[in-house]
Image: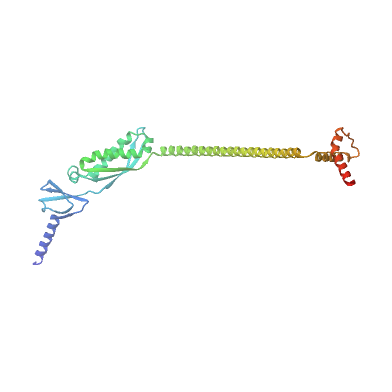
Amino acid sequence: MELFIPLALAVIVILLLRSVVHIVPEYQRLVVFALGRYQKTAGPGLVLLLPPPLQSSVTVDLREFSVEIPQQTCITKDNATISIDFLIFQQVVEAADSVIKVQNFRQQVQQIASTTLRAVIGDLVLDDAFAKREQMNEVLRVKLDDETHRWGVKVNRVEIREIVPPREIQEAMTRQMTAERIRRASVTEAEGKRASAILVAEGDKQSNILQAEGARQSAILRAEGFALALDKINDTANHADSRTMTLQYLEALKALGASPSTKFVIPTEFAALVAPITALAAGRDEGKKA
């Protein structure tokens, strides 16, 4: 019995200390009430309070948290029924408002999110609901933030996770996507054939140009060679003396006379051609006699 009283006193002291002394982390705040009236928002750090019922407190977490909104059935502007689920990322920025002005702000956010989503989807046609997901996220965020701001809660972002249309619309979309893929494949194949034909034609063109250029260069070289040969022959003929020409003339006559059936007439100019040779032969004979 003597030990019971000290132990009871120790327990009472510990409980009083726990209700009086509070260590508040950086990410939390204490909303303090004195005799039921809001007094202050305390924290972080060491906070001392009077024991209840003189003072009481509510702990509020200031970190961002997410709220999952389950699939909601909505009707688009063109009367298509779709199911959408999304996430809301939010955080408390005014601890006192989140406690005093709303009973359960998490539950209230879910309810407002459902009604806001239906209103947003009702202003869109089905195609826009699929194509403008980012715009829908932003519209939902702004509308929800306007509602939750008075509770001291800020909506940071909204993420639509899945949009599920009815089965018949899914089948129609599948057929449409298949047709679009076939069309794109046909266009790609046609463009490939066109590009290939252009490359082949360009190659043939370049080949013909190169062949023509080669033929032109070959003709120019042959013409230049022929011209050089003519110049050489002409130069040789201009520098040949009369005796050389006479000997060549005689060689030609000899070749003509080699055939037994050949008949030719000696022109009168032959004497003039032979005269230098005769004179040369006479000069040699006189030299021998002397």
Q: Is residue 288 above or below residue 127?
A: below
Image quadrant holding the N terminus, namely: bottom left
Q: Residue furthest right?
A: 260
Q: Name the residue: 20% across, 42% down.
A: 151
Q: Is residue 137 left or right of residue 278?
A: left
Total numbered labels: 0
Frontmost residue, 223 versus 112:
223
Q: Position of residue 263 (x, y in %)?
A: 90, 35
Q: Position of residue 168 (x, y in %)?
A: 42, 37
Frontmost residue, 238 versus 65:
238
Q: Is residue 229 left or right of residue 1?
A: right
Q: Position of residue 111 (x, y in %)?
A: 26, 41
Frontmost residue, 55 versus 6:
55
Q: Residue furthest front?
A: 290
Q: Quadrant of residue 143?
A: top left
Q: Position of residue 238 (x, y in %)?
A: 75, 37
Frontmost residue, 237 versus 36:
237
Give the color scheme: rainbow, by chain, secondary structure or one colour.
Answer: rainbow
Q: Quadrant of residue 219?
A: top right
